[in-house]
Image (spheres, helix red, strand yellow):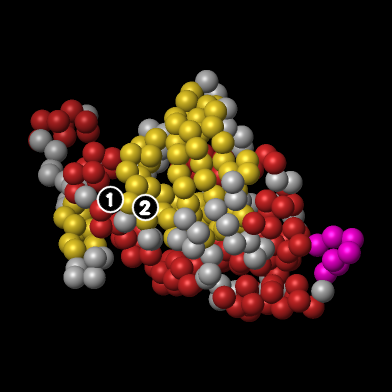
Amino acid sequence: MTLSAKGLSWSAGGTTILSDVSLDVRPGEFLGIIGPNGSGKTSLMALMAGIRRPQAGVVTLDGRPLSAHGRQAIARRIAFVEQQAETTERITARQAVELGRTPHLGALTPWSRTDDAIVDRALEEVDMARFSGRLWHTLSGGERQRLHIARALAQQAPILLLDEPTNHLDIGHQISLLQLVREQDLTVVAALHDLNHAAMFCDRIAVMQGGRIVALGTPAKVLEPQRLADVFGVTVDVERDSTGGCFIRYRRPEPRPAKLKLVAEA
Ligand SMILES: Nc1ncnc2c1ncn2[C@@H]1O[C@H](COP(=O)(O)OP(=O)(O)OP(=O)(O)O)[C@@H](O)[C@H]1O
């Protein structure tokens, strides 16, 4: 199952947000998308999930434009966890995860015990089984985020698109969630803010800046001090280990000159 973007451009509110973005996602890989706030990560994921349509370019799934696949067919192949997906419905944690089964249900395929088992397993995988009966609005941000991931796992789509999946999670759950996703036999595209998590879990990383992909490759190749200075405006040391892994150590910025400080604080 391959997902590709070719020459995507997208504008909104009179502004160009994505310009000529091309990206081939390799089957089975964990591809991270990093970039500063507003660089276009969410917009790109929404186009790749078929939620928005590009003004130019095309997203293809198995060689056919997304627009040629029906909504249900896309949902069976691509699960998308959005950044601020919320619901005002009075539903339980379990019902939220059950929604992941919707693309598989139909007149000839009603809800079955298999669906129950898939939902049970998804709840267990994100460590939320004990919250099954809790109402959505009583759950914390991190608990809701874990349910969003469980819903996507229950969808059993071979491609998982995750927009900042570790949002709201404590460090233990951030790492266990990325490991859980990594262990699945899935193709994963995830927008991530933590560069060390990207280095730890991704096979490849795409770097976005100003609505374009400015670098694409293995973490060791992409996470270069000069590039991180250019893209994020941070000074870092990158430590590399013998296995090809890398770790980013951030340097504290120099203090502002005293005169500038006074002006700024006046
Ligand atoms: N519907 C819209 N109308 C106008 N501008 C939009 C719209 N959607 C996104 N934008 C703008 O497009 C730019 C890219 O937004 P996007 O959410 O894709 O960035 P991002 O890289 O995911 O950012 P973040 O890291 O803050 O989540 C931002 O400047 C945003 O304000």
Front-lying residue, 45 or 128: 45
- The residue under the point 50% across, 67% down is 181
Q: Residue 169: x percent and y percent?
A: 46, 64
Q: Which residue is mark 1?
A: 222
Q: Residue furthest right?
A: 107
Front-lying residue, 70 or 192: 70
- The residue under the point 48% across, 52% down is 25
Q: Which residue is mark 2?
A: 205
Q: Looking at the figure, which quarter contains the C terminus?
A: top left
Return the disc, 1 or 2, that comes first in the chain's sequence: 2
Q: Secondary structure at mark 2?
A: strand
Give the answer, above or below, for where 36 lies relative to 244.
above
With 165 as the anchor, is 260 left or right in this view?
left
Q: Would you say residue 107 sits in the magenta stretch?
A: yes
> How many residues crowd mark 1 within 10 Å: few (<14), some (14–19), many (20+)?
some
Q: Main secondary structure of the magenta part?
A: loop
For disc 1, does the CB lie below 8 Å from ligand 1? no
Q: Would you say residue 36 sits in the magenta stretch?
A: no
Q: Secondary structure at mark 1?
A: helix
Q: Identify the amino acid type marked 1.
A: Val
Q: Identify the amino acid type marked 2.
A: Ile
Front-lying residue, 120 or 49: 49
Q: Marks 2 and 1: in contact by CB < 8 Å?
A: yes
With 189 as the anchor, is 66 left or right in this view?
right
Q: Residue 74: x percent and y percent?
A: 68, 51
What is the magenta range? 105-111
Give the answer, above or below, for where 196 lies relative to 94.
above
Q: Residue furthest top?
A: 14
